[in-house]
Amino acid sequence: MLLLLGLMLLYSADCADLPCTAMPGLMKQLDAGNGELCGVTDNGNIFRWTNQNWVQLPGQMRHVTVGPAGLWAVTQDYNIYNMRDNNWVQVTGLLQQIDAGGDKFLVGTNFNDNVFCVNQDAIDSKATSLPWSSLDRTLRYYSCGPLGCWGVNSDNQTFYRYSVTPTNCLGSQWSQVDGSLVMVEAGTDGSVYGVDPEGNVYKREGICPKNPTGISWTQLDLCSRIKHVSYDAGYLYLVTQMGHVLKCALPESMAANLL
């Protein structure tokens, strides 16, 4: 209890450039979207942030995502589950990482870094047999927003996928973007954040419908090294390399809607 209090005091003031507050618990990965926040611990327990507390959900998971396509997770054995009527329902496919941030379509990568996606109509149908489509690139992490999809490969190279839509999750072509990242997250407002191999966090500047890849990366001045980042509704959620969770309020100029 004293340790948690100390951490909250440490981060309740401005953390460098951003006002950040420590949240309870330790996580290895989390995802924010559609006003929800979910996370997974090192031992695979999965939680949803409800009424200012973490509420444990059933099951053991390795990765979780929440967004316009709903709440999804993958198990330690790479099986895929969707939360329906407060119950986990298994669907077809095997993934190591999954993202529900697109406009009701779903994407993810498997244990061979192959990239897959499912169009909106299949998600809306609530089918358990999903028609996964394969993309022509290997990526370790893949995340989508309203202005397209972003990914990083095993060499930490960053890529953007053009012309992704709810009815054409495959898109049209890849463009390599400058920057060396271990993960990248596209927010539901079109913003994009990434984490580099040293645990620094970056925001992609200049993103707009006419220039969806933006123009440059700006490093955020943070007090800790970070291993995971997610963004929703004006707040940046960070998991430090020690597993602590920070909620950072972004200035209005940084959190502006890009659509």
Image (cartoon, grey):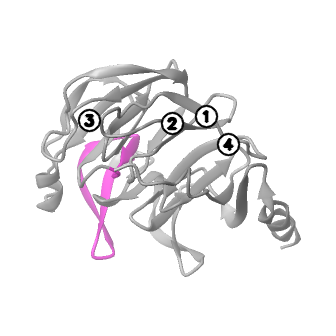
Lateral position of residue 177 relative to residue 148, left or right: right
Residue wearing tag 3: 116
Label 2 with label 1: CB-CB less than 8 Å = yes
Residue wearing tag 4: 226
- Dot 1 falls on a residue whose secondary structure is strand
Q: Residues within 10 Å of mark 1 (few under 14, many from 20)?
A: few
Q: What range of the chain is rendered magenta?
A: 80-101
Rendering coords of residue 126 (x, y %)? 15, 62
Judged by its main secondary structure, the magenta piece is strand
Position above or below: 164 against 160: below
Residue type pointed to by label 4? Ile
Number of the front mark, 1 or 4: 1
Give the camera-side residue of 152 and 242: 152
**Magenta stretch encompasses residue 84:** yes
Task: Inspect this view and state whether residue 45 appears.
Answer: no
Q: Residues within 10 Å of mark 3 (few under 14, many from 20)?
A: many
Position above or below: 236 against 114: below
Number of the front mark, 4 or 2: 2
Q: Residues within 10 Å of mark 2 (few under 14, many from 20)?
A: some
Rendering coords of residue 78 (x, y %)? 37, 44
Residue wearing tag 1: 218
